[in-house]
Image (cartoon, rainbow, N blue to C red):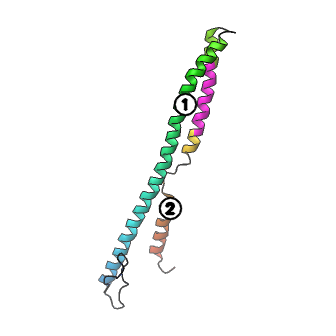
Amino acid sequence: MATASPTPGVPRPPERDASVGQLLSVVTSDLQTLFRQEVELAKAEIREEGTRAGKAAGMYGGAGFAGYMVLLFLSLAAVLGLANVMDGGWAALIVAAVWAVVAAVLYQKGRSRMRTVSPKPERTVETMKENAEWARHPTR
């Protein structure tokens, strides 16, 4: 019969003449512990990926605000400067086209950083595969 181990959380191996029920109890207990540990690993990985996603989203926001401020002040200066040599409408159109290109570049950079974020807890999936393989063939 499996008795309490001197080390908490680490069960003592069952005795040689333990019944099938006792052995199943030990296996069930071990599986429950393993499952809890896998859940904790998944939570940790999701928190880590959430942090990375939050930082990428912050970069999107920062790029948007900075782009807005630059767009506002430089656009006004550029339109006024170009209006000295051409019609004001054409000057405004040229400046708007330049800022459209800048916005596209910022969007692409943010998008590429967001693609590095993995929503799947890779380590947990790998250890779950290993656990399933072990459960199928425990002697390998």
Under circle 2, the secondary element is helix
**Which residue is located at x 60 percent, y 26 percent?**
100
Task: Kindly identify the residue that appears in the image at 40 percent across and 66 percent down.
Answer: 37
Q: Nearer the viewer, mark 2 or mark 1?
A: 1
27 over 48 or under it: above or below: below
Q: What x and y, as percent, mark residue 53? A: 49, 46
Q: Amino acid at mark 2?
A: Arg
In primary-sequence order, the first of circles 2 and 1 is 1
Asked whether the viewer can see residue 93, the reply is: no
Is residue 4 a member of the stretch shown in magenta?
Answer: no
Label 1: few (<14), some or many (≥20) within 10 Å?
A: few
Q: Quadrant of residue 19?
A: bottom left
Q: What span is colored magenta in the figure?
A: 95-109
Query: Residue 60 at x, y = what percent?
Result: 52, 37
Q: Residue drawn at (53%, 26%), measured in percent from left and top?
A: 68
Q: Main secondary structure of the magenta part?
A: helix
As helix, strand or loop, the secondary structure at mark 1 comes to helix
Rendering coords of residue 114 (x, y %): 54, 44
Seen in the image, is 86 located left or right of residue 21? right
Residue 92 percent coordinates (x, y): 61, 15
Disc 1 designates what residue? 66
Label 2 belongs to which residue? 123
Give whichever of 100, 82 is nearer the camera.
82
On the rendered image, what quadrant is the N terminus found in? bottom left
* 3D distance between C-alphas at marks 2 and 1: 37 Å
Observer-nearest of 77 and 29: 77
**What's the residue type where badge 1 is placed?**
Ala
